[in-house]
Amino acid sequence: MEKTKVTEREFYKMIIDMAKENERQDIIDFANKKIEQLNRKASGSRKENETSVEIANMIYDVLVKANEKMTISQLLQNEILKTYTYVDGKEVKHLTNQKISAILNKMANPKEGNAKVVRIPDKKNVYFIANQE
């Protein structure tokens, strides 16, 4: 007999079928609620927040103007990025290496479409350059 993996959704559908045979409405309602939660979880589109998009555009502009490969530290030395502040919750924050790194890596490895920047690893340093194709 061949074993097959059952997904959570299929599992709850089987529970609903068994509960219908035994006329257990409470179990049917519970399983339907779980399936509904799975559907919401699967369809949940994660959109980037406006601040990250704005920062990504600023970084791209800096890379285009520089027209050379730059490290994250070099990017932070740029006057525009050095003085930029954003609100995160209730706090006003300055850009950090970690924030710029996360945004640059998203720009270099997009889920769809062409990469806006190219990531160039070089021994200990990682450089980024604008992809102007």
Image (tube, rainbow, N blue to C red):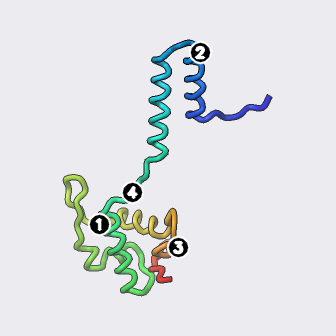
Q: Amino acid at mark 4?
A: Lys
Mark 2 vs 4, N-terminal side: 2
Which of the two discs, 2 and 1, sits closer to the camera?
A: 2
Mark 3 vs 4, N-terminal side: 4
Which residue sits at x=37%, y=62%? Answer: 98
Q: CA distance from mark 3 to mark 4?
A: 28 Å
Return the mark for residue 95: 1
Return the mark for residue 121: 3
User: Closer to the camera, 18 or 113?
Assistant: 18
Q: Position of residue 67 (x, y in %)?
A: 42, 87
Q: Amino acid at mark 1?
A: Leu
Return the mark for residue 21: 2
Q: Position of residue 125 (x, y in %)?
A: 48, 73
Which residue sits at x=45%, y=82%? Answer: 69
Return the mark for residue 47: 4
Which of the two discs, 2 and 4, sits closer to the camera?
A: 2
Q: CA distance from mark 2 to mark 4?
A: 42 Å
As helix, strand or loop, the secondary structure at mark 3 comes to: strand
Which of the two discs, 3 and 4, sits closer to the camera?
A: 4
Q: CA distance from mark 2 to mark 1?
A: 60 Å
User: Closer to the camera, 7 or 36?
Assistant: 36
Give the image quarter of residue 9: top right
Query: Does the CB distance between marks 1 and 3 fall below 8 Å?
Result: no
Q: CA distance from mark 2 to mark 3?
A: 61 Å
Q: Amino acid at mark 2?
A: Glu
User: Closer to the camera, 31 or 81?
Assistant: 31
Q: Examine the rendered structure and indicate whether residue 4 appears above or below residue 70.
A: above
Return the mark for residue 118: none
